[in-house]
Image: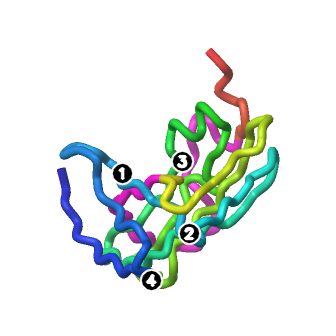
Amino acid sequence: MNKCVIQVKKLCFRARVPQPKSDLAAGMDLSALLEEDETVVLEPGQIKLIPTGIAVSIAEGYEGQVRPRSGLACKHGVTVVNAPGTIDADYRGEIRVGLINLGSEPFELTSAMRIAQLVIAPVASAQVAVVDELDETIRGADGFGSTGLK
């Protein structure tokens, strides 16, 4: 397994530092940072940006991917609206998580609640070349659904 050190800065003393929950865990939980007694209600269909109270420095050649927590998504319909969200290696602001409630019931968020996962992944740097023609493939320009369901 590739190891990448990320630096984490707590922007508030109550912020939770993400840590893997097992030796082979791909992700680390991101926790909400709300006022101590604050509850945020996410109504069905509603999107809210939830602060985590941390900023990170990710090594060049890597990105942070903000992904849903499976328990929140499967049990409550609460997921990351732009999954996976990307944290670029040069971003130094607070990590905030865009959550959406796709469930049928309001969902209550409290401070320190684990709301998403942070996965660190290598990225390839692309160089763009403008051309007049692209190489031919069997699929060609056939789009959505062109390969069928079976």
Residues at discs 3 and 2 in contact (Cβ within 8 Å) = no
Residues at discs 2 and 4 in contact (Cβ within 8 Å) = no
* Chain-order first, disc 3 or disc 1: 1
Residue located at (72% from left, 62% from top): 48
Relative side of 105 to 35, left or right: right
Could you say whether the residue bearing mark 2 is in a helix, strand or loop?
Answer: loop
Query: Nearer the observer, disc 4 or disc 1?
Result: 4
Q: Which residues are magenta?
A: 117-141
Residue of label 1: 27
Q: Position of residue 21 (x, y in %)?
A: 28, 47
Residue of label 3: 68
Mark 2 belongs to which amino acid? Glu
Tell me the CA gap for discs 3 and 4: 23 Å
Tell me the CA gap for discs 3 and 1: 10 Å
Kindly identify which numbered label has been placed on residue 128.
none
Residue of label 4: 11
Residues at discs 3 and 1 in contact (Cβ within 8 Å) = no
Relative side of 129 to 9, left or right: right
Q: In terms of depth relative to the viewer, which is nearer, 61 or 25? A: 25
Q: Residues within 10 Å of mark 3 (few under 14, many from 20)?
A: many
Mark 1 belongs to which amino acid? Gly
- Residue 58 occupies which quadrant of the picture? bottom left
Could you say whether the residue bearing mark 1 is in a helix, strand or loop?
Answer: strand
Query: Nearer the observer, disc 3 or disc 2?
Result: 2
Tell me the CA gap for discs 2 and 4: 15 Å
Could you say whether the residue bearing mark 4 is in a helix, strand or loop?
Answer: loop
Tell me the CA gap for discs 3 and 2: 24 Å
Residue of label 2: 36
Tell me the CA gap for discs 4 and 1: 21 Å
Q: Residues within 10 Å of mark 1 (few under 14, many from 20)?
A: many
Could you say whether the residue bearing mark 3 is in a helix, strand or loop?
Answer: loop
Query: Nearer the observer, disc 2 or disc 4?
Result: 2
